[in-house]
Image (cartoon, rainbow, N blue to C red):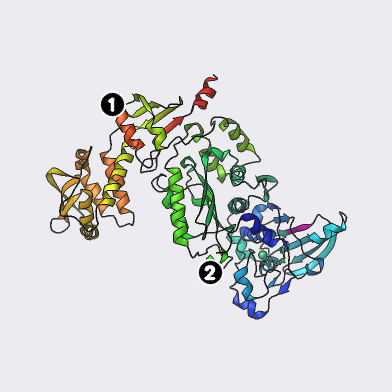
Amino acid sequence: MSQLYDQSTLHSISTSRSPLLTLPPGVAERIAAGEVIERPVSVVKELVENALDAGAHDIRLEMRGGGLHLIRVSDDGYGIPADELERVCERHTTSKISSVEDLSRLHTLGFRGEALASIAAVSEITILSRPIETALAGEEQPADWITLSGGEIIQRGRRARLPGTTVTVRDLFYNVPARLNFMRGSRTENNHVMQLLQRYAAGYPALRFSLVIDDRTVLQTSGSGDLATTLSELYRLPLNELLYPVEASDGAHYRIQGYIGNRVLAQPTRQYVMLFVNGRPVRIRALQEALEQGYRSLLPRGKHPLLALHLMIPPEEIDANVHPAKLEVRLACEETVGAALTQAIRSILERSPAHPETMRFPGPALANQRRLPGPHRHGLRVAESAEGYHAGSAPTGTPEAISSLRPLAQLQQAVILAEAPDGSLYLIDQHRAHERIIYEHLRHTYAGCSHEGQEEALNAHMLLEPVIVEMKRHQAELLEQRLPMLRGLGLECERFGGRSFLVRSVPSGEGAEQLASHLHELVTMAAEDSADWEDHLLIALACRSALRRGRELGPGEQLALLKALANTAAPAACPHGSPILLHYSRSFLIDKFDW
Ligand code: ADP
Ligand code: MG
């Protein structure tokens, strides 16, 4: 197995430059047609990727009028030699490959030599560059520039610049009125660019990125090399307390490194789910599913996590048949990596309680991303108020922590107050705690019984009177097939002619009686046409049989509930994903009381 990449080697690969070549027609034809320049964000993507390919450490992006008036990307990369400046805007001209064989060894983001040509055809473009080699010649060495309009050179000159390249694109689509009509206004375009740059910044934490939109700095990273710091800089929030580091590797096929957000960072869109393969932002459906699987039942429905994970994969494991520059890639070991991701996320999240102290800060500020944050406006204020409450965040949601809790009282007949040995306070939602306990119990019984069906339902609580439920036609067929599995669970049903089913028993245990009044709902879930029907059913069963809020619990019952909760694998979140525990740390009390 070849050595796994780390990011530093990845980046250094591209710091030397080969001469510019025009690809021979045979090679050019075999490379699939490049992405079209559809909108300002496509220009930004190409220019930023060129800067990355040039080994830049500092990438600045400036934009006006939603990118239609101006897009300017400046970098401190290796630059373009003066004698090649004229040709970089020609089609199929690239310094990155010279043959099709090179494609499999490709370490650059670009290689088709088409981007600048496509941009030049629909705008006025100025390329100013000073090659890195001239740095030796001293400060006063000038940089050369050329301006092309509609693909024709209209002006050229020289001026001072540090080594690196600045590409300025003006009046985008001035000669393509159809595209202009299609544009949705600068806010939308600004947003796309912002999101894109956030991804690159999280993809390359060791590089400095800045984005200035209409004279306002809306994004700035320090290039600290630390991903958690980068994420905090991107969202202008002290996220460190709410991010959990992930580190996993099988020593052969993959290494996973990065951060996943606590569930309080759950967001209404997938915008904050960032996955990188060898530094490149990618979308891999199987892995996307694996990520969501890791969070499943820990996030409320319709919510998505905030996370940034880097996968380091040996290049030969990345499917070469799929275009290396495409967002979509395929990995030879997708299943293994997916399982590792799910496992890594699960084991971290299931043990982390909600921190009420910080809860209210990140949500609104992140939601505000739609309004691009002004220079350090939201950021600073939030940072000041959220700081200092978390003196060393211990793994407060672990079973060990919970088994040492001492119940103090019950609040509103719904919440157990408990004291930890370190003097911190826990609030435990009794309904959700019980739900978690029953859910895991059901899951074990269910996993323990064979799907072949059994002679007699174990764990069944016989109903005094069997109940008839009516299904829709397609549900009836599905349900019929699943009857043996349901029996294994203690939910004994039989077909009663047509679309009617007779329910004889429910899973036994505390709260079984409560289930009787929800049979139609439960059996309907058992007939759900989805891959997740089993889990949905278990969750519903747990929910319907769990202790209600409003039930008074004596001290003995409170203690028993906590002990049982401590025996679960995921004591911090109910199966729906809502928090079970709130934890007020001692440092929070000290801070608030000013002790
Ligand atoms: P590709 O990236 O596929 O090679 P482009 O049209 O994007 O094609 O760029 C053409 C060439 O121009 C690149 O191969 C590179 O040699 C040069 N180039 C473009 N942008 C930069 C930059 N920011 N720094 C250095 N060289 C650049
Ligand atoms: Mg390129």
Amino acid type at image mark 2: Val
Viewer-nearest residue: 594 or 101: 101
Ligand 2 rendered quadrant: bottom right
Q: What stretch is highlighted in magenta?
A: 162-167
Residue at image mark 2? 322
Closer to the chain start, of discs 2 and 1, is 2
Q: Where is residue 356 in the image (x, y as percent from the top left)?
A: 47, 32
Marks 2/1 in contact by CB < 8 Å: the verdict is no
Q: Is residue 575 shown above or below 36?
A: above
Instruction: Give me the residue at 59% from left, 42% from top.
Output: 232
Q: In which quarter of the image is the C terminus?
A: top right
Q: Is mark 1 on a helix, strand or loop?
A: helix
Q: Position of residue 315 (x, y in %)?
A: 57, 65
> Which of the labelled discs sits on residue 556, or is there none?
1
Looking at the rendered structure, the number of numbered marks drawn on it comes to 2
* Marks 2/1: CA–CA distance: 61 Å
Q: Is residue 424 shown above or below 100?
A: above
Does 166 appear in magenta? Answer: yes
Residue 483: name its quadrant: bottom left
Question: Left or right of 467: which side holds 20?
Answer: right
Q: In which quarter of the image is the N terminus?
A: bottom right
